[in-house]
Amino acid sequence: MTYEISSWPEAEGAARATALFTDAFDAAPAGVWASPGRVNLIGEHLDYNGGSCVPIALPHATYVALSPREDDRVRITSAGTDPELWTGTLADIRPGGGQPTWVSYALGVAWALARAGHELRGVDAAVVSCVPISAGLSSSAAIECAVGLALVDTFDLPVTRPELVLACQQAENDVVGAPTGTMDQSASLLADEGRALALNTLDGSTELVPFDLTAHGLNLLVIDTRASHALVDGQYGARRTTCETVAAREGVRLLGEITDADELLGRLDDPVELKRVRHVMTEIGRVEQFIELVRAGAYDRIGPLLDASHASQRDDYEVSCPELDAAVEAARAAGALGARMTGGGFGGSAIALVPTELVGRVEQAVEQAYAEHGWAEPRFIPAVAAKAGRKVR
Ligand code: GAF
């Protein structure tokens, strides 16, 4: 039976977070904040290379019920984590502080805000989430951004959303130790219902582009391969280092600053550098075309760009895996107009652009391919562009 990963209505998420808070701390929380996971449409591994990416926020969100304390103590709870209740002080949460990884994801942003000079006190917090974990759909950014929004509101901090994006990224880079860019936090904090976020990481500009496939008889199907996915295991960082090494040698800060891509590609003789840089340069071109087509509502023409993006990530950036390739191939063979892996890679999710009447057929084709390989059953999300993070109670 096809398994679709459902999201919680906002009231349910708020009620779940409140109930967990009340159970743990025997009091009602001061408020509840939510922030979503994301799926990227195109522009992969460009957010640390000065290119553009185009994510949407998912309806799946992390909910944080939180109250300020008078002291600097922190108590945080989340169902199913180890330990279920962590207690410490604000000063304990820092790079190399020894706190559990989930606490670093949740409260690293407190460290980043304090480092930027903002005054915080301790908090009690309870976290619940319906963003699938380890699916490449940014459960990490969802928790960082939900807690970040809660801290900014609670302590009335003069922090704009773009500044909060950077604080959450610093938390992930320095406290968690994952050398990621700003795409996931930007999607969680700056995206919008019915619109995709075109994020230009060269000049920091953003544009919300209307993105409504259903009016055009199409669906965006997210396929969670359930193959493992981790950004702290060195593969992601290695690719980032290669790109930064070439950029430094070329005298630019980011590869996206290079204007004559063909000239550079013609000169690179290290085969690994050539492949990595070729992915970055060609993907930058695909994103430009994609944004133009979406602005024009020409959704029926974006499929080949998705396909080419997948091939580039598989062959040049080498961040795909057999489960992602099989999902993409089965989806296309069953009628998808285009498909690609999405997010950091090495597992996680793929997306497929599917005519609405073929969604069931595509899901079954992917399931069948997985069964033939003996892999875990894939899970699906018929995705729509949802709201950014916000206070929900
Ligand atoms: C992960 C990272 F967190 C993002 O910053 C981005 O680099 C992405 O991989 C690849 O596009 O989600």
Image (cartoon, rainbow, N blue to C red):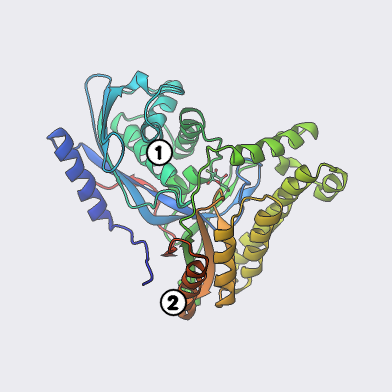
Residue bearing mark 1: 144
Numbered circles on residues, count: 2
The image quarter in which residue 340 lies: bottom right
In the rendered image of this protein, does residue 211 appear above or below residue 178?
Answer: below
Residue 168 drawn at (x, y percent)? 45, 35
In the rendered image of this protein, does residue 249 appear above or below residue 335?
Answer: above
Using a 10 Å C-alpha cutoff, classify the residue at mark 1 as few (fewer than 14 neighbours), some (14 to 19) or many (20 or more).
many
Residue 288 drawn at (x, y percent)? 67, 57
Q: Is mark 1 on a helix, strand or loop?
A: helix
Q: Quadrant of ligand 1?
A: top right
Q: Is residue 283 left or right of residue 173?
A: right
Furthest-left residue in view? Answer: 26
Residue bearing mark 2: 360
Q: Is residue 235 left or right of residue 39?
A: right
Q: Nearer the viewer, residue 13 or 101?
A: 101
Q: Is residue 50 visible?
A: yes
Which residue lies at the image location 65% right of the left edge and 37% below the top edge? 238
Quadrant (top left/top right/bottom left/bottom right) for the N terminus: bottom left
Which residue lies at the image location 48% right of the left edge and 62% below the top edge? 375
